[in-house]
Amino acid sequence: MAGNTFGSLTLAHRKNFSNVEGAAENNFISFHAPLMNHRFGVGANLFTEKVNFVSNTYASGAFAYHINFGSYNVLSMGVSAEYNSVGFNMDNVIGDVTDPLLGQRESNFDFSFGINYQHRYFKIGAAANRLATNLLVNDNASILSEYYSGYAAGLIPIRGGDDILEPTFTFRKFSDVNETWDAGIYYTYNNLFLLGGSMRQGDIINLTAGIKIAKKVLLGYSHEMMNGNLGSDVGSSSEITLRLDFNDRNYQERFRQDYKNSLAFRRKTLSSAAKKNQIGAKGPKAFKKSQKKRLNNVKSPSSRYNSTKKLSRVKHKKFDNKKKRKKNYKRNHRKRRYR
């Protein structure tokens, strides 16, 4: 998906079937980069193929929208516009090269749609390719048709995220009767070396190796073989790839950084809790300092007495004995009078 990572420029050259004269040779260049803080992505691809006297050119431009749910959870959706052109390679034509039909090229515009989801430990995606009108050389022969593809890959961190183990599975459906699948596993060591292999339907084995020749430059090589008698007749295929990363902050580095941040947060939490629950001084010097501070705060008994709160005094009403005697006399005198 365009702009799903930090962007890269990839160059590749592939030569198929070493024992077959005039076998297909492919050249591929790809560019993609994120935009607006990884919310959007753009990409472009150019693919050329020569098969004996037939020449094919494919170009595409892609745009993608990324929904980030965190550091690793990303849902991406993209669409691409494509251009296909098929013609003849005049250098390999034997016969009358002045035939006007040989100079004609058939071209067609197309589009594709794809969706991808990446998690911290896996990624999965699907695409519908070449959805518009098929590219036709004539009314009865179809050269390129629509096809559907899907893949799933695991991202298993090893050694604290320094290494990555990636099991992969890919399925392609070219037509109602033509489909293929690939299953493989790849191991990246310390973001420096890449080793892996895959098996394709039809007993085809692919071996891949890669090495970081610079901080942002990866050089890779793939060797593909067909088992059986057919494989010995047609020979093997080989591909060499050169990739330039625009930013070296890859999956391994992000995983290691998150791992270090989590450990630092844990240490900080534990150390702060230990400080709160600490009893006594850390050492003799700290103990002496705390004792000196306590002695300086000790005051004389009189100062301590003056600093304490005094008991509150309760005010009592004065008792007037004369008034009370007078009231008692009047009350007793009335009682005697009415008897």
Image: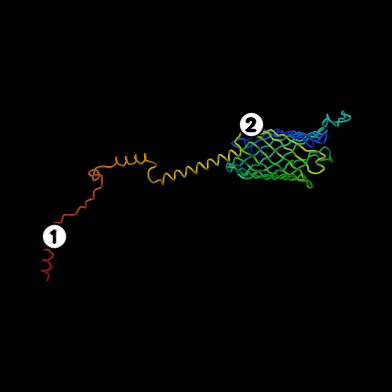
Give the image location of residue 96, x and y in percent: 89, 29
Q: Nearer the viewer, mark 1 or mark 2?
A: 2
Q: Nearer the viewer, residue 215 or 137?
A: 215
Amino acid on which disc 1 is placed: Lys
User: What quarter of the picture does the C terminus occupy?
Assistant: bottom left
Give the image location of residue 234, x and y in percent: 81, 39
Q: Nearer the viewer, residue 136 or 9?
A: 9
Q: Residue at x 37, y 40 (%)?
A: 284
Mark on residue 324? Answer: 1
Q: Nearer the viewer, residue 71 or 300?
A: 300
Q: Are marks 1 and 2 in contact (CB under 8 Å)?
A: no
Identify whether 220 is placed above or below 227: above
Left or right relative to 214: residue 310? left
Mark on residue 137? Answer: none
Give the image location of residue 20, x and y in percent: 82, 36
Q: Residue at x 40, y 45 (%)?
A: 278
**Farthest front residue?**
284
Name the element at disc 1: helix
Q: Which residue, given by chain and number where applicable, does mark 2 sit on?
A: 214
Amino acid on which disc 2 is placed: Ala
